[in-house]
Amino acid sequence: MQTEIIKVTDKNCSDTVKRAADVLRLGGLVAFPTETVYGLGGNGLDAQASGKIYAAKGRPSDNPLILHIAEREQLCDIAQGIDARAEALMDAFWPGPLTLILKKAPKVPYETTGGLDTVAVRMPSHPVAAALLRAVKLPIAAPSANTSGRPSPTAAEHVIEDMSGRIDMILDGGSVGIGVESTIIDLTEEIPMLLRPGFITLDMAEHVIGRVDVDKAVTRQVSADVRPKAPGMKYRHYAPKAAMEIVDGDICKVVDYVNTQAEALKRENKKVGVLATDETKGMYNADTVLSVGSRESIESVAHNLFGVLRAFDACKVDCIFSESFPDEGEGSAVMNRLRKAAGHNIKRV
Ligand code: TXA
Ligand code: MG
């Protein structure tokens, strides 16, 4: 399949989204930028289009898709039981990086929800995503536009790398703003449950609706026999090709430990990568030392994280040591993705 790649500019935006909307209406797949990561869109009400999404990503079909909408009125078509908590969260954070899990409406095919009776919904704020959704007037199922298991795409180049030849169209809207996927909150239980941390933090959500519990799979590896609430949480995810270890502790001790390990691995002819920060990158002796951002700005770390994980693949390192970040506020999203990238391999020093 020939994939059409279109750079979206202010000038061509309205024509481009109209064309992309036509592709979606005809059952095709279009990747587009959102404020979090690039999404791989298809008509969420069309079981066949959902099937194409799973095939293009190589994604297990029990891992449900998020439906993206442009207007609140679209919600009653796809979800039921929209209560005061849902309304309050939508008032506070939509459009924006928050996904809500609600009871699904009959119109949504089980192929889209991975067989579940619930549905994930979000209203993105990125101007290209919003324009596309307004033009197509359909709920668009859009997982992150990466091959299943690879880091989510935060630039069009990443989407091209993974999806070229597999989908109809890629809208290139440049680098995304946030860089980690939306926060997911399940509202189908009595106590709302955070299933995936993102830039809407636990505190921010609790400020609006009171107590929110955190799913165990957010911070811990779940054993193979447990089915986590967000099925996506059980897969090794966001993963670079190399083995990865997170090193947690006082930063001087982290540097010492990593340099000692790197030296030993070099003697075995292994290529070592270090995921460092602006403040520490000069302190490591390794083959590839990449800064993920400044320790002063967790936003910069989130923004660069997936791109840096992809860059390690390009450098063909054998193993990666990563610094750790405070697991609080927006740092929780970073640490959740890092832990999954490392397969929960954490060394405390
Ligand atoms: O920021 C985002 O949310 C991006 C952009 C493109 O919008 N999308 C995204 O989709 O990250 P995806 O498919 O890569 O991740 C969706 C996650 C998965 O972990 C999935 O298991 C969970 O949402 N999920 C979807 N529907 C669910 C449901 N009904 N119940 C529980 N978890 C659900
Ligand atoms: Mg994903």
Image (tube, grey):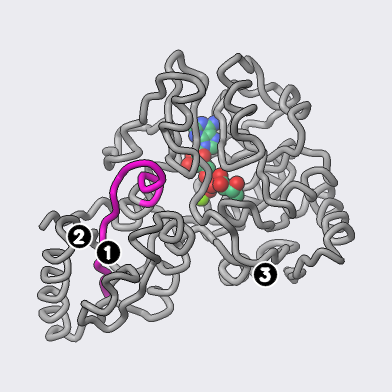
Indicate whether 182 appears above or below 4. Answer: above
* Left or right of 306 on screen, residue 252: left
Span of residues in magenta: 318-334
- How far across and down, in percent of the image, does residue 198 sit? 46, 43
For image coordinates 44% across by 56% down, the residue present is 302
Q: Quadrant of the N terminus?
A: bottom right
Q: Work out whether residue 191 or residue 56 is closer to the camera in this orientation and state it.
A: 191
Q: Which mark is residue 165?
A: 3
Q: Is disc 2 placed on a helix, strand or loop?
A: strand
For image coordinates 79% across by 49% down, the residue present is 131
The residue pinned by badge 1 equals 322
Q: Residue furthest front?
A: 296
Indicate whether 188 appears above or below 98. Answer: above
Q: Where, by quadrant of the figure, is residue 9 drawn? A: bottom right
Q: Work out whether residue 126 or residue 195 is closer to the camera in this orientation and state it.
A: 126
Residue type highlighted by circle 2: Val
- How far across and down, in percent of the image, does residue 16 sit? 84, 61
Question: Counting other residues with Cα less than 10 Å from the Cα at mark 2, is it few (<14), some (14-19), or many (20 or more)?
Answer: many
Q: CA distance from mark 1 to mark 2?
A: 6 Å
Q: Is disc 3 placed on a helix, strand or loop?
A: loop
Query: Quick check: can you spot residue 155?
Result: yes
Residue type highlighted by circle 3: Gly
Indicate whether 272 appears above or below 230. Answer: below
- How far across and down, in percent of the image, does residue 22 sit? 86, 52
Q: CA distance from mark 1 to mark 3?
A: 33 Å
For image coordinates 33% across by 60% down, the residue present is 295
Q: In the rendered structure, are the residues bearing label 1 and label 2 in contact, judged by CB atoms less than 8 Å apart?
A: yes
Query: Quick check: can you spot residue 62?
Result: no
Q: Is the CB of the residue bearing disc 1 within 8 angstroms of ligand 2?
A: no
For image coordinates 68% across by 22% down, the residue present is 105
Observer-side mark, 1 or 3, equals 1
